[in-house]
Image: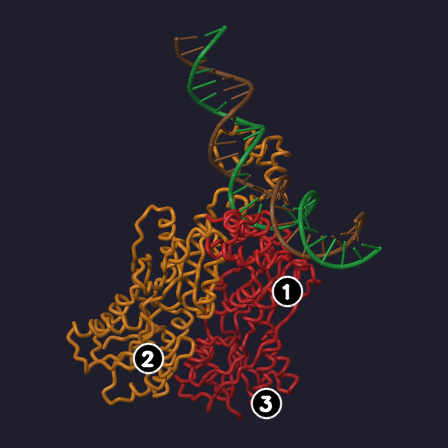
Chain colours: A red, B orange, C green, D brown
Amino acid sequence: MVSIISVAKAAGVSNKTVSRVINGEPYVTEETRERVEKAIRDLGYIPNMAARLIRSSRSNTFGIITDYVSTTPYSVDIVRGIQDWANANGKTILMANTGGSSKREAEIWKMFQSHRIDGVLYVTMYRRTVDPQAGDVRIPTVMINCRPQTHELLPSIEPDDYQGAQDLTRYLLGRGHRKIGYIRLNPILLGAQLRLDAFRKTAAEFGLAESDLSIRLGMEGPVGAEKNYVFAVATEMLQQKDRPTAIMSGNDEMTIQIYIAAMALGLRIPEDVSIVGFDDFRTVSLALKPELTTAALPYYDLGLEGAELLNSVVTGNKVPSSRVMPCKLVERTSVRSV
Amino acid sequence: MVSIISVAKAAGVSNKTVSRVINGEPYVTEETRERVEKAIRDLGYIPNMAARLIRSSRSNTFGIITDYVSTTPYSVDIVRGIQDWANANGKTILMANTGGSSKREAEIWKMFQSHRIDGVLYVTMYRRTVDPQAGDVRIPTVMINCRPQTHELLPSIEPDDYQGAQDLTRYLLGRGHRKIGYIRLNPILLGAQLRLDAFRKTAAEFGLAESDLSIRLGMEGPVGAEKNYVFAVATEMLQQKDRPTAIMSGNDEMTIQIYIAAMALGLRIPEDVSIVGFDDFRTVSLALKPELTTAALPYYDLGLEGAELLNSVVTGNKVPSSRVMPCKLVERTSVRSV
DNA sequence: ACACACGTTGTCGACGTTGTCATAGAAATA
DNA sequence: TATTTCTATGACAACGTCGACAACGTGTGT
């Protein structure tokens, strides 16, 4: 492997001077700089990160720990956001997922330490509380889409589920809907509670009675093996003689079943029922006809901001603090005014 | 940071002896071994990979280059397969995606080299031909879900789209369907052509005439910005007076629109039309009611086998060769016998 | 008693890089 | 002219680990 020394020889300078050129340090004549750069090109020299790290004990690498990235298609955008940030700022990303096993998580932290990672982004696929082993290890950590269960104060970045559901509810109310159905997400997800609360409170503030709201559970059970009642619940809801004019769904995926339930009953969307989702999972929200009005979770921004925040924690520039990122209402054609 | 030397001091032995214990080398008394292990635990020592790499020039790290992992929810399972293999075999994974930019790809190869990666897994999200820059760089490379465009012979692992579509077609024929519609995937995807070929040939072998087949284009245009005709095409196909009894779809995502088109025309699935998909993208195939019969792409296995193959290439155990992995028919309830 | 083998441990240097400090000449100041 | 400051470069050590080899002690066979 071609090293800094071979370059130095080829350029007729010392290895330190080559180092200076590589790192853009001052005190190199334009002429020597060019000679060195030519030698680098000719020999195809590429700096050895390992050697650099060993000398300067700064790896310029962030680690990502996830639970189930790969098994759920939703929040991969978080990872994309992180990677784009890393990419723009010359950092390397080491990524591993626990698959839910805490034994595996311990191994990952160890692996990260052995690579002398600068910081860790702890990412979950569903918004929830977790108990990361960061404290044992003293690596700067930022939580994305989740928050620490224990008292430890790790900075976190989360989506504003409440605001998203509030916007959606107001949108429906603004369009004249007064009887609204709500099919709930799995209650073990942190977002589920927040979205439901927002729906309830916003409707109440507007003046709707609890009896105008038809709230039903769509899913429950452990993540990955949940029981799914959505189709049945939607069918039932739409067969009531005083049926809602609009249905709000825990997420976009569930709306597939709501659409089908509605159509099987001969109802047209949005003429007979309006429907809104949550997430803006585009594989679904754009495939449905009419296309789905929904609230986009700011996954990409979560990743971007998370990386940025971690960086300031690592460099010690900023007091760690937690943040919430807004959801954005995406208006399409699944809602009509009544 | 606690190093091998501090451990050596604490245990009252030389650093070399500590090294022996860490690497499980022979010629250490049980007693010294225990003393050293205790010191390691007490000090919380964790080996420095960078130093190890610099000494032994073996990083035990594989790189993954992808095009759009993060933007498409489908084939994340490939990555999961790779990670599980790496995990079981004590390898570290470095991952980066090009987002389609070849400038970015060049940077990634450089980054991989600077980390002295042992080998690269080149993964695409859609099956297609590509032109990786592996040759310039001489890092062992295995292609997953894609194949090299040029003459270079890089080993590759791909799904057997042909066999998958063949199985699906036979399944439909076996259930008595004689008029079959086919809505084509975007033709720029390699799998699209193979699936269509399999459908055509299998139907012809069975004795169906070209006029029994109703083949229509569902999507076209550049990936990520394609035009989508599926809903319109499906509606048209189902309004023919001599309409097909079954529709085969390029992928599962497209079947959402086919379901909705059918239901909007008052047709019931599977009583009036049977439908099959492709991919087993479970977010869709399980959400549809009735649940979708489809062919599962072996994404997870692609990753697992790819990593395994790369490993044999790196260790020089095996002649690089290309492989194809079978798709598996997943029978659910969207097809009836006629 | 001797040579010899074997198991156990230590010494030392090298990997590629950068930080520290020294040096030499040029330019600026007194 | 003498002295100081600045620019440009190099020599050398150090980071943490492991491989090569040396050295020590204990037992074995002669």
A26 or B178: nearer the eye? A26
Label 2: which residue?
B269
- Quarter where residue B282 is shown: bottom left
Residue B42 higher or lower than B336, as above or below: above
Residue B177 higher or lower than A78, as above or below: below
Label 3: which residue?
A174
Name the amino acid type tagged 3: Gly
What chain letter is assigned to the residue under label 2? B
Q: Are marks 2 and 3 on the same chain?
A: no
Can residue B46 be seen? yes
Assess disc 1: are there few (<14), some (14-19) or many (≥20) residues with their C-alpha within 10 Å of its C-alpha: many
Q: CA distance from mark 1 to mark 3?
A: 37 Å
Residue A42 higher or lower than B98, as above or below: above
C9 or D9: nearer the eye? D9
A105 or A312: nearer the eye? A312
On the image, the x and y values in percent for residue B177 come to 22, 77
On the image, the x and y values in percent for residue B106 come to 45, 63
Q: Which of labels 2 and 3 is toward the front?
A: 3
Find the residue positioned furthest to the bottom.
A338
Assess disc 3: are there few (<14), some (14-19) or many (≥20) residues with their C-alpha within 10 Å of its C-alpha: few
A72 or D16: nearer the eye? D16
Q: Are marks 2 and 1 on the same chain?
A: no
Q: Which of labels 2 and 1 is toward the front?
A: 1
Label 1: which residue?
A309
- SS under mark 3: helix
Q: Which circle marks residue A161 in the picture?
A: none
Name the amino acid type tagged 2: Ile
Q: Which of labels 1 and 3 is toward the front?
A: 1
What chain letter is assigned to the residue under label 3? A
- Quarter where residue A295 is shown: bottom right
